[in-house]
Amino acid sequence: MRAFKTILCPIDFSDPSYEALEYGLGLAQPANGQIILAHFLHNPSSEFFHEDGHVISWDKAKARARALLEEARIKHLGGYAKADIVVDTGDPHELIVNLARDRKADLIVIATHGRTELAHLLVGSVAEKVIRHAPCPVFVVRPHDH
């Protein structure tokens, strides 16, 4: 089997994305591979709002995302030493594909949220777009309860 030396794991701070991250770790460890934990700010999630409901600045949102990724590195990767953190702003699927290309990723491990057909039709799927445009294989993790 092919060794995965560089694995990109996009994280949106959902349970399915953390589950995908754990798969990424399982695939990286045998090859002592590098894991890239990445979050791309497009539509801020609840973690990026002040208590009064206002969105925090992009700089603060990036710092918050970086802190959340560091927590994920510790909690879900057990502090795995070969893990980089990347935070950027823009369209998630484009940034995932570009980062995979720039960092010469061997694999992208990404979660899908198992949306219904209507929800999928309305919002699309980042995972689906990544699959279509990725420069490397993509391992898609479905939600555990699906």
Image (spheres, rainbow, N blue to C red):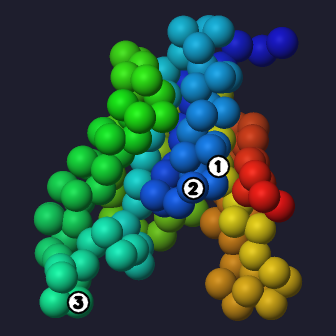
Do the numbered discs 1 and 2 sit on residues whose CB atoms are within 8 Å? no
Q: Nearer the viewer, residue 44 or 143?
A: 143
**Image quarter of residue 43:** bottom left
Residue drawn at 48 percent across, 45 percent down: 99
Earlier residue among tags 1 and 3: 3
Residue under pointer 3? 53
Residue type at mark 1? Ile
**Image quarter of residue 94:** bottom right
- What crowding class fits label 3: few (fewer than 14 Cα within 10 Å), some (14-19), or many (20 or more)? few
How far across and how far down the image is residue 56, in percent?
17, 77
* Residue 119, placed above or below residue 113: below
At numbered mark 3, what does the secondary structure look like: helix, strand or loop? loop
Separation (CA) of disc 1 from disc 3? 29 Å
Residue drawn at 67 percent across, 22 percent down: 27
* Residue 89, placed above or below residue 50: above
Residue type at mark 2? Asp
Residue under pointer 1? 110
Mark in the foreground, 1 or 3: 3
Quadrant in the picture for the C terminus:
bottom right
Q: Is residue 47 left or right of residue 99?
A: left
Residue under pointer 2? 15
Earlier residue among tags 2 and 3: 2
Separation (CA) of disc 1 from disc 2? 12 Å
